[in-house]
């Protein structure tokens, strides 16, 4: 079974609208972390936001927020007020366990296109 | 600029040739990683080094070897390149701990013909 599932290969949104990118995860660990990365067409990987499994509040970073629903094992990324520069590939990732020896497992990504 | 530096940025190899991808970080991070990215597959872990002196296999290690030369440098070697190794390779680093995201290099686009 996949550990990280992103069911939306592509999403379209108009500028200034909000968009939600879906991510579900599978782990039996109690301690884990969830991450979102952005990859623009230039290719670099940009860290956006992090949510720890014990964090009670949903993480927010500027226009990005992570809608964390632990019981459903979902960690959706919400981008408010989309901008043209948000057009990119977005990856959800998970780190299991609490140790420097754990690694990130990535989903297959969602391509977001923002139109004027 | 501080960060993760990968060289080269682009490379074309013939089947059977060998090469080493270089990666260096200047953030004093303990852990370093090599991933490959293929269309529709996301990023898959090849090898990682939790700390200086240790290396471990990831999800797709076959056909690769790594060396953690020191705390800063982590190289990936293809001994006999195959067309299936055509991919974009990313090096990343992170401090120990749960909450920190990885810092990625800019990637190496490798084509094996």
Image (cartoon, rainbow, N blue to C red):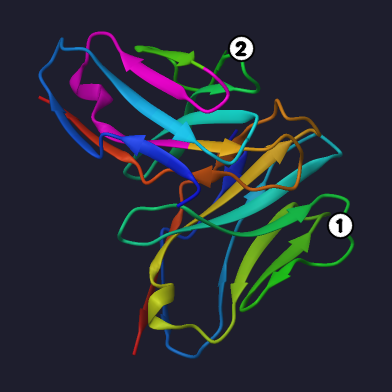
Quarter residue B102 falls in: top right
Quarter residue B28 falls in: top right
Query: From what the image shows, is residue B112 above or below residue A53?
Result: above
Q: Which residue is mark 2?
A: B53
Q: Which mark is residue A55?
A: 1
Between A86 and A100, the residue placed more toward the observer is: A100
Magenta stretch encompasses residue B56:
no
Please tell me if label 1 and label 2 are on a single chain: no
Residue at (56% x, 83% y) in the render: A18
Residue at (68% x, 37% y) in the render: B95
x, y percentage for residue B73? 48, 25
Category of crowding for the residue at label 2, using alpha-carbon neighbours closer than 10 angstroms: few (below 14), some (14–19), many (at least 20)? few
Q: Which residues are magenta?
A: B70-91
Residue at mark 1 to residue at mark 2: CA–CA distance: 33 Å
Query: From what the image shows, is residue A25 above or below residue A63?
Result: above
Residue at (22% x, 15% y) in the render: B81
Query: From what the image shows, is residue B33 above or below residue B98?
Result: above
């Amino acid at each position: 079974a996949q550990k990280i599932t992103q069911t939306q290969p592509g999403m379209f949104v108009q500028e200034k609208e909000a968009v939600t990118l879906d991510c579900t995860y599978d782990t039996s660990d109690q301690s884990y972390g969830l991450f979102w990365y952005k990859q623009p067409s230039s290719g670099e990987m940009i860290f956006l936001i992090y949510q720890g499994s014990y964090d009670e509040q949903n993480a927010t970073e500027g226009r990005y927020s992570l809608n964390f629903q632990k019981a459903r094992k979902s960690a959706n990324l919400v981008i408010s007020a989309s901008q043209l520069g948000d057009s990119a590939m977005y990856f959800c990732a998970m780190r299991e366990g609490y140790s420097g020896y754990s690694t990130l497992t990535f989903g297959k990504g969602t391509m977001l296109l923002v139109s004027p | 600029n501080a960060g993760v530096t990968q060289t080269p940025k682009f490379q074309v190899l013939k089947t059977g040739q060998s090469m080493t991808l270089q990666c260096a970080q200047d953030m004093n991070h303990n852990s370093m990683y090599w991933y490959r990215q293929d269309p529709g597959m996301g990023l898959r872990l090849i090898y990682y080094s939790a700390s200086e002196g240790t290396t471990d296999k990831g999800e797709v290690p076959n056909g690769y070897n790594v060396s953690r030369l020191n705390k800063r440098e982590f190289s990936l070697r293809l001994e006999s390149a195959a067309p299936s190794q055509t991919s974009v390779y990313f090096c990343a680093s992170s401090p120990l701990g749960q909450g920190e995201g990885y810092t990625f290099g800019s990637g190496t686009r490798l084509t094996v013909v």
